[in-house]
Amino acid sequence: MRLTIQQLMNVAARSTRRLTVVQLIPALQSGGAERSALEVARALVEAGHRSVVISAGGRLVPQLEAEGSEHVTLDIGAKSLRTLAKLGPLRRLLRELRPDIVHARSRLPAWLGWWALRGTSPVPHFVTSVHGLNSPGRYSSILLRGERVIAVSQTLRDYVLSHYPWLDPARIRVIPRGIDPAAFPYGHRPDEAWQRAFFAEYPQLAGAPLLTLPGRGTRLKGHHDAIELVAELKRRGIETRLLLLGVVEPGREDYLRELRALVKARGLESQVALTGPRPDVRDIYAVSALVLQLSNKPESFGRTVIEALSLCRPVLGYAHGGVGELLAELYPAGRVPPGDREKLVERAAELLRVAPPIPMLQNYRLADMQQATLALYEELAAA
């Protein structure tokens, strides 16, 4: 049974127990784990609980606080020996806050939280989330020490069980990330004013079907494959445009020069645009003929897959990891064997010609993720 946030609030109102939940995360800058922390924090507040996030801070803090949560600035995620000096302050914080639940979403904060809890009384329940396919070993194993371990996909659950045979499967809960269908409404089309402004800003993207690859500036995301895809489609007489959305980031200048050199070498300077993160991704997806997911390594999930499909936009991606799991369930026509560039071109041409219909999304909704996470907290608190 799926509960709305209003129903969660009603449940909380009937309860005599107001929980205090502390989430530990390196920073609140960007990323899937950070977004999930905000979404759970919002649900906690709306359900009448106290929500606290401890991190080094970042651009998402004002939103977190505006939505009713508390933020405590403490750098518990920097990969440095100096971070160990934060153990004492974190232990003091937890003693003051007296949380019912401590939820760690990253490895180093989880280690600090684990050690800090040894000095608190009563000891809060310890929950961990595995957001990525981390290299197996002792350092990563801390994320499997929670009383409950949240995996964001079945792929991730299978991965940790295969590498940590001592892990009791009963402690793992698969709680996929979710999106708000109201934020990505089925069949959405941006208004004419937005379209005029967007294509005026990026005139090279007008005049042909737009392919959009969202992802930060790292080789993991498959930007080279996307550029080669557009080049090969052009060689076959199929004109397209390509937007590498979110690739422009500080500190990635060498990588950006490499991508621009490849664009120039393939003669695509008038067909490709590179941008930083943008707030209008919904509208960009909505005007895209294809949304690409070409990570060259398996990823734990694939939020952009469900965002695009929620909008009724076709997704083309490599069928491995969480992306492959989602495509197999929601849009099999968009699956391509990982790294198979020839098949990628063929499938892109097919989808550009006639894309199979996309049904309205019935799962992977934000409220489902929030309800399942709060239910897990309440289950532990009642134990």
Image (cartoon, rainbow, N blue to C red):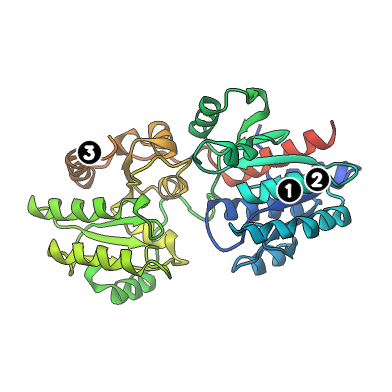
Q: Nearer the viewer, residue 200 or 250?
A: 250
The amino acid type, in three-letter code, at marker 2 is: Leu
Q: Badges 2 and 1: C-beta atoms under 8 Å apart? A: yes
Sequence-first disc among 1 and 3: 1
Observer able to see residue 162? yes
Q: Which residue is mark 2?
A: 117
Sequence-first disc among 2 and 3: 2
Q: Which residue is mark 3?
A: 340
Question: x and y percent of residue 170 in the render?
Answer: 67, 23
Q: Nearer the viewer, residue 332 or 294?
A: 294
Seen as rendered, the residue at the extreme front is 81
Q: Which residue is mark 1?
A: 113
The amino acid type, in three-letter code, at marker 3 is: Asp
Question: x and y percent of residue 237 in the render?
Answer: 8, 53
On the rendered image, what quadrant is the C terminus found in? top right
Q: Badges 2 and 3: C-beta atoms under 8 Å apart? A: no
